Amino acid sequence: MLELAAFSCVDPGGRTIGDLSLTAAPGSITAVVGRSGSGGATLVRALAGAMNNGRIRGTATLNGRRIDGATRDELTTAALWISDDALPGGTVADCLRILTGDTSAADDLGLADDLARRLTSLPIDLRLRLHCASLLPRAGTTAPSLILVDRVLGAADAATRDRFCTLLRDRARDGATVLWAEHDLDAVWEHAEIIVELVDGRIAWQGRPDEWQPHSLPEPTLLTLARALDVPPADCRTAEQTLETLEESGIVLPLFPRRTADSAAPTGSGTLVDAATVGLSGTAIEIRPGECVGIIDTGGRPEALARRLISKLPGGDVVPSQLPGTLRIGAAARTWERRHDLPVGSVLAHLPTLRPRALLVDLSPGELALFRLALAGGPTTPLWLSHPQAGLDPRERHSLAEDLRRRPAGTRLVTSRDVEFLVRACHRLVVVSHDHVIGDGSPSAVAKLLPTEPLVCRAVGSTRYLRLTDVLATTETQVHA
């Protein structure tokens, strides 16, 4: 059992959590949620002994033993810290050997083709597969009694996300205490027994998920759906439970949803790209001005196609997904401004908390994500964004999806393994399988071709309802059979 009493800490960057008192029971998952900077990551790092030069007050006990102020070495056997920052260096093979003892799990994890790849170049969505490896049972070792997780779901595909959550649940059932800081509220809603919401470093709410009234965050999708359709939230913790609850309640949605006004894609002529010129077979792809287009490859990775497509668009450029850590924020911003003829200072104008002379390596994942979006916000020329939602908190992610659908500064190509984000953010999706264009249209038009059905589709039993707004915007939402 993990017990915190009047627990406070300040990390080297000045982020503070204050006077926290909570209990996380063994055999259960306690999720810590909040806006970026609210203190979830700081709490996890402090308990993991990874708070270098931080200040800690109060007490934290694990099964009666004080762990506040303990170092990483002292906590090695008692606590497992799962974070991108906790991954060892070297190659994927090196990492797997440290985490599991060998590389035999690589094929099962979908990492067999990446064993020689260095972690610094591993796509962000594949890192979660390494975190899955850290949760695999390992013969001859003592299972940790405490598992600390720091926002790792990021931009992973649905299958990997589900696998990680299942492994985390299995560890909890084996008796581990799990404290999980996470921005993916839909995953938290499904898997956590207790939710703790932090606001400005203090507990604003804690309790069961079905009783949660968020203070600073949007509701999880299924919680909003349950309340909109007037069914018990406790009966809607998964998509399957929700569909069963709706059927038992006699609730039938209209055959066709009412689309919101902002869901219409830009019209007019654009750049017509011959499929053969980007290594594909099938129909040509037209990219229109001011359009947000998601690229999905059901049989592989979409990055190579996106890079070829953006090169065919006049003035097309790439928002870098990995920036040199030794570069200063101000220098990176000014280089981008000169490259795209933007006013001096425009990139950092909406990020007043970032110091221009600070190094990019010193930014938190959330700050780095916002910096990349600041780069993308200025140019009116076409841009390719890879995993733009990674690192953002739930409210920032919602705002980004809305901005891309309503008012992008110019044409935007988006790649991500997160189908949920793509259907919310994009006017149109181009779906490719084995170098052949199998679908090109609005998210609803290509819904049946997607690698996984979006959460709302599965919850209401119809591929015509892709987003929560499709349900909320439909005036006659309930017809009782």
Image: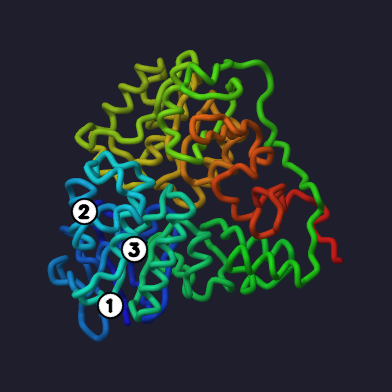
Residue at horizontal 29 percent and vertical 42 percent from the top: 122
Secondary structure beneath disc 2? helix
Does dot 3 land on a helix, a strand or a loop? strand
- Discs 1, 2 touching: Cβ within 8 Å: no
User: How far across and how far down the image is residue 373, in percent?
Assistant: 43, 35
Q: Residues within 10 Å of mark 1 (few under 14, many from 20)?
A: many
Compared across the picture, whether 189 is left or right of 442 comes to: left
- Report the residue that reaches farthest toward the bottom: 64
> Which disc is residue 145 wearing?
1
Q: The N terminus lies in which quarter of the figure?
A: bottom left
- At horizontal 24% and vertical 46% (from top left) the residue drawn is 115
Q: Nearer the viewer, residue 408 or 133?
A: 133
In this orientation, which residue lies closer to the viewer: 316 or 391? Answer: 316
Q: Residues within 10 Å of mark 3 (few under 14, many from 20)?
A: many
Residue 51 visible within the image: no
Kind of residue at disc 1: Ser
* Amino acid beneath label 2: Cys
Residue 243, placed above or below residue 28:
above
Of tags 3 and 2, the one toward the viewer is 2
Give the Cα distance between marks 1 and 2. 22 Å
- Answer above or below: position of 274 versus 300: above
Note whether residue 10 is visible.
yes
Q: Amino acid at mark 3?
A: Val
Q: Quadrant of residue 109?
A: bottom left
Quickly name the residue at label 2: 95
Q: Nearer the viewer, residue 438 or 292?
A: 438
For mark 3, what is the residue?
Answer: 149
